[in-house]
Amino acid sequence: MARRALLIATLLTAFAAPAHAEQLVVSLSNHRVAVTSNFDGEDLVLFGTIEPDRPQSAMRGTYDLVVTVTGPRHTLRTRRKDRVLGIWVNADTREFVRVPSYLGILSNRPVNEIANAETARRLQLGLNNFLLPQAIGPDTADTVRDDPFRTAFVKLETQYGLYRESPIAVTFLTPTVFRVAIPMPANAPTGSYGIDVQLFGGGQPLARTQTALEVIKAGIEQFIADAARDYGLLYGILTSLMALVIGWIGSVVFRRD
């Protein structure tokens, strides 16, 4: 009898408090960005909806969204200059290993208002929490957030428009339909970009999905890039000859008799 009562109570609790189960459905306005000679940047738009994973499932009233866009990985060496005897010299160097060439953290409000500090660090939400490993001696690891090399690196990349964090890039058109503005600067590196979309409710992660886009060279830029890669020797000879011919023509045109 007691076992039957316990079973009934468990069923009543399950039906009285349905689980919050959501899933994300996203679509990108353009999955391929072509870089030509007159390319001055492009604004992409990511549309999405929040849907229950099962019919009749309960959904929350308000949501938060964090979208992280990462460009191709590369390794960069940074240098810190100091004045020695009145001359600026390279005093120290640090190598950032396989960090994103482009990094965008886009959300509907500041990240520290969406999740607590521990969750933000664990999920790499925001520029301050994103892992940027450095080669320090024989080891490779991320450093503290106020590390001067890390701070200077993020500042420089932000000035170039390659790193950005925007708390107003995500707009909810309805409680379950959203729009994300993804800016691609004119100096966006070519390659594959990953887009990670994370949904939060009440400070807790609820759902996650990924998509991707590609930035490619097009037109004469693509032809030159392919020629330099596939026919390096011939490309070098032709460019040298072209420089000689242009120099000779310039000397003839501007010659003073």
Image (spheres, rainbow, N blue to C red):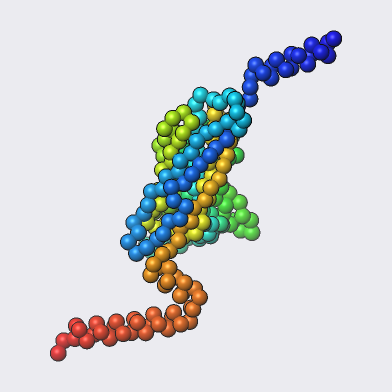
- Depicted 115 relative to depicted 225: above or below: above
Give coordinates of residue 2: x percent, y percent: 83, 10
Residue at 43 percent across and 47 percent down: it is 29
Q: How many marks?
A: 0
Residue 162 can be seen in this image:
yes
Give coordinates of residue 190: x percent, y percent: 46, 60
Residue at 60 percent across and 26 percent down: it is 57
- Depicted 55 relative to depicted 182: above or below: above
- Depicted 190 relative to depicted 66: above or below: below
Residue 108 can be seen in this image:
no
Q: Foreground residue, 107 or 222?
A: 222
Q: Residue furthest left?
A: 257
For the C terminus, which image quadrant? bottom left
Q: Residue furthest top?
A: 1
Q: Foreground residue, 145 or 205?
A: 205
Residue at 33 percent across and 84 percent down: it is 244
Give coordinates of residue 231: x percent, y percent: 49, 78
- Depicted 55 relative to depicted 29: above or below: above
Q: Foreground residue, 217 or 132?
A: 217
Give coordinates of residue 17: x percent, y percent: 64, 19
Q: Residue furthest right?
A: 1
Q: Quadrant of residue 200?
A: top right
Q: Foreground residue, 3 or 70?
A: 3
Residue at 39 percent across and 58 percent down: it is 187
Q: Residue furthest bottom?
A: 257
For the N terminus, which image quadrant? top right
